[in-house]
Amino acid sequence: MSQENATANQFEFKAEVKQLLNILVHSLYTNREIFLRELISNASDALDKLRFESISGADIADNDLPLEIRIMFDKDKNLITISDTGIGMTREDLINNIGTIARSGSAEFLKKVSETNKDVSNIIGKFGVGFYSVFMIATDVVIKTRSFHKDAPAFLWKSDGLGSYEILQLDEAFKRGTQIEIHLRDDAKEFLDKYRLESTIKKHSNYISFPIYLENERINTLPAIWREPKSSVTKEQYDEFYKNLSFDSDEPLDVLHISVDAPIQFNSLIFIPKKNYDIFGFNRHEYGLDLYVNRVLIQHQNKDLLPEYLSFVKGVVDSEDLPLNISRETLQENVVFNKISSNVTGQIISHLLKMAKDDPEKYKQFWKEHGKIFRLGYSDYSNREKFAELLRFDSSSVEKVDEVTSLAEYIGRMKSEQKEIYYLSGASRDAVIADPHLEIFKNKGIEVLFLYDPIDEFVMDSLRTYKEFTLKSVEQVELKSLDKFEDIIKREKKEEPLGKDEEKEFDNLLKKIKEILGDKVTDVRASERLTDSPSCLVNPTDEMTSQMQKIMHMVNKDMSIPKKIFEVNKDHHLIRNLLKIFTADPNDEYIALVVDQLFESSLLLEGYLNDPHKLVNRIKDVLEKSSEWHSAVRK
Ligand code: ADP
């Protein structure tokens, strides 16, 4: 053919390109398919540029050509062809853009490659050398191109990727745009397969805004709805998109559509799933947002865009301001990336605040499903005030099952002199309600938040305050500070106050109890907090709460039992009887039996009783004794 006869020109590649090509030809690859992503992305860029020229009023060659990308393959010729009707290239463009590596990324890439020297397919796309990735699969590459300028000649660029390339002017009537012919290496014939090409296009280039045809069949039919104006996207479109993205058969609980133009441009679609499907932790790694640069997927499930506590959301982020070829490592240091990250985080939080206000039922559902992971947000200092607003708890004021309350609601109900927000941890509502520490709060009608998740203690510990109120565990409350609150439930003091002598005896009884318990406790004292229980264990003041202690013990694999203060309720019937027995005979064995039993019962409630055998045997003894008494009375 005569098409290649004019102004033939042979060029040497620049040294760094040679070096790069040498590596590409001689390397091993696991991810060669990314060549397609790179070439489609270049084609899409070229089409974008053309559209821009057209809007700017330039006189454009072959103006009637549709803006599109076409991919064909020919098994007999071992050939894949990718063509676009974009901006095309002049001879100078070919020399400057294809013959040289313009980007500073090349040096970095070469350094990286010489370090790993193995699989380059995972890193090639991340540096500004996308076009050359074609040599992972090609023996020869031919580019035919014609610039959009009216009357610009068409050129042919040709290279085997070894050391030089050739540029010829084409005589044939070649229309505006670029066509890349890829003559495949023998070991790359797998790409001569419709399914293979189609799935690769779908994976990386599904949302390219120009139509992509493979063998004349349109492949990318899904619009990148995140780039559309909110008002033009229907609920059905959001739902469909979400189901495609998440493999969830249900529609999302909520969707947040973000578009920001300045100072950085990005779009994002964030979905809150109805259910938390990760109850068993099997999908612990299946999270993260899909990251697009100008509609090209550059990372599936990016884990750095959002903090872990928001990992329950699904969605995409797309920015034109990020480089297409960016590595994971450099992403995290990228200023644009970090700005997008904090913006999206902030928007999700604001969205949740709005949901909590406008649609409390929906928010309740969100909290029920995702509250467990969301609680980890206590570590996000930049959003802590909003985070505190979003927290929900069970509480002594909550009556209905499954109902929760916020800190704002708590302070709305609290007593006028109250300066602290009280909480108590336990395994369940039943456990917390049975906790002797709660008794004094019940009597005074002071609301206490109930915490069932160990994380909640960390949340409270790290927040420390809400508005001007201190968050305080009931275990660490200075009991005197509660004196200002009247009892609202009249304490049914069945027992008369002790006389002077009895008080002295009671002090002796306390000493006796201390003797019995020995170094299992730090102290034994009369209790101010108890009404219904005969005794309880109390943390020495200012130490951490029992729950926190338990966590630390677990973390440190510490099996020892933390030492606490044993408090005795002077006005409890059982203790009064014990006092009588003690007064009659200070060494009556029954005293030790009861004290040990009370002590171990407290340990059992707190989850520290490692060996229940003694306790069970003692119960048997007590039952035996009480049965004797009972049968004697019935006679
Ligand atoms: P990058 O796309 O990161 O700039 P590439 O090596 O992929 O790096 O491409 C180098 C340059 O070649 C592009 O910047 C562009 O100017 C030009 N180019 C590549 N493909 C096309 C195309 N299909 N149409 C027009 N120009 C192209």
Image: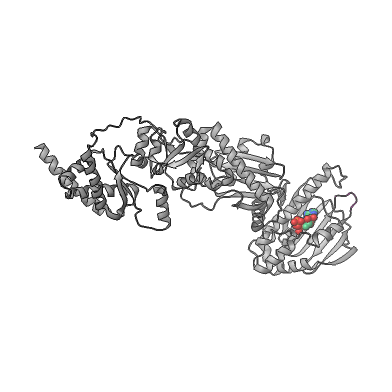
- Residue 617 drawn above or below residue 435: below
Please report the bounds of the magenta region as a residue range: 148-152
Residue closer to the observer: 461 or 130: 461
- Identify the colour scheme used: one colour
Residue closer to the observer: 426 or 487: 487
Residue closer to the observer: 584 or 259: 584
Q: Residue furthest front?
A: 500
Residue 543 image point, x, y percent: 41, 49
Mark yes or no: residue 455 visible: yes
Which residue shows up at 64% across the image and 39% down it?
A: 257
Q: Left or right of 374: which side holds 187? A: right
Ligand 1 image-quadrant field:
bottom right
Which residue shows up at 41% across the image and 33% down it?
A: 397
Label total for image: 0
Q: If the image is split into quadrants, where does the N terminus sit?
A: bottom right
Q: Left or right of 20: which side holds 54? A: right
Residue 545 image point, x, y percent: 41, 47
Question: Dominant secondary structure of the magenta stretch?
Answer: loop
Residue 270 image point, x, y percent: 60, 42
Q: Left or right of 81: which side holds 317? A: left
Snapshot quadrant of residue 28 = bottom right
Q: Residue furthest left?
A: 635
Q: Left or right of 501: which side holds 57? A: right
The answer to whether residue 151 is magenta is yes
Mark yes or no: residue 77 visible: no
The answer to whether residue 615 is magenta is no
Q: If the image is split into quadrants, where does the C terminus sit?
A: top left
Snapshot quadrant of residue 268 = top right
- Residue 310 drawn above or below residue 183: above
Residue 358 image point, x, y percent: 56, 31
